[in-house]
Image (cartoon, rainbow, N blue to C red):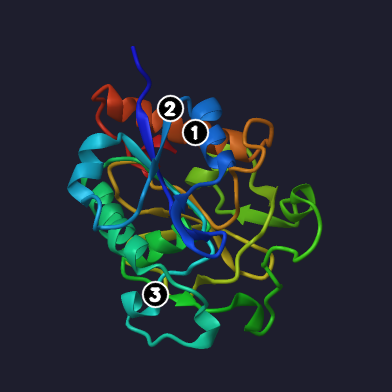
Amino acid sequence: MSRPVVGIIGNHHILHDEYPAHAGGTMNSEAVARVADCVPMLIPADPRFLSVEELLESCHGFLLTGGRPNVHPEEYGEAATEAHGAFDRARDAITLPLIRACVERGQPFLGICRGFQEVNVAMGGSLYPEIRDLPGRMNHRMPPDGTLEEKFALRHTVTFTEGGPFHHLMGAKQVMTNTLHGQGINRPGARIVIDGTAPDGTPEAIYVDGAPGFTMSVQWHPEWDAANDPVSRPLFKAFGQAVHAWYFGAKPQNHRQSA
């Protein structure tokens, strides 16, 4: 029997300064295929080419990936400034309604970095344009120099809520993660539970309260070395189990029930 399909949200890029393309990091596909044990399928996140309804029927779960463009602040009622960076309105138009539909249906998704932020915005929350500009906050951005190994190296702890879903999944209240993001949660959306934070108080792990399916999302990048990292592997394995359960028609189980 074939494996279930995970739709991986792609990002728009211009190759060689002129060629438009949708692309996704190989490490995302590797984590989905080798750790979650699902078929990775790259999605061109643009409503000109597909609809949310088609995605819900074609895929069994979704990986909401990171990406350089940010969610447009108009999506949470604010005006764009230079600090907000680049945008991808086509991706916004697909992912935000997709997240809300998955929450309602119980269809599993895993949010990563921008995907984590999309989950918050989709549920009515807002974002800070630049975390490092806030008093008392550390610089969470990717180091500008070095190898990929150095850029994705573990850089700070994340502390989970005692007895919460992430604590239960990881088997530890505190873990080490990488950090490669500029924006972060300002106002949590309705039903968004912040279940893990960095030492400076920046939200790093969330889920949707009362959702009938898997909605765990993280601000770090667990796709890096997912097969070996002791934090990334259980997260992708749990996501894969939820996708397999959806594929085989099992009743979705919310995070409070599973914890």
Q: Is residue 1 above or below residue 229?
A: above
Q: Which residue is mark 2?
A: 38
Q: Find numbered disc 2 in the image and state the secondary structure of the residue it sits on.
A: loop
Q: Dividing the image into 4 quarters, which one contains the N terminus?
A: top left
Crowding at mark 2 (Cα within 10 Å: few <14, some 14-19, many 20+): many
Nearer-N-terminus badge (2/3): 2
Q: Nearer the viewer, residue 246 or 150?
A: 150
Local crowd at mark 3 within 10 Å, few (<14), some, or many (≥20)? many
Residue 50 visible? yes
For label 3, the residue is 72
In the picture shown, does residue 36 fall above or below 256? above
Which residue is the site of mark 1?
Answer: 32
Q: Position of residue 13 (x, y in %)?
A: 49, 59
Which of the 4 image quadrants contains residue 96? bottom left
User: Amino acid under label 2?
Assistant: Cys
> In the displayed structure, does residue 229 sit left or right of residue 128?
right
Q: Nearer the viewer, residue 67 or 110?
A: 67
Q: Determine contact: label 2, label 3, CB under 8 Å.
A: no
Q: Give the amino acid type for the residue marked by disc 1 in the picture.
A: Val
**Kind of residue sitting beneath label 3:** His
User: In the rendered structure, which disc, 1 or 3, sits on the residue that comes first in sequence?
Assistant: 1
236 w.r.t. 14: above or below:
above
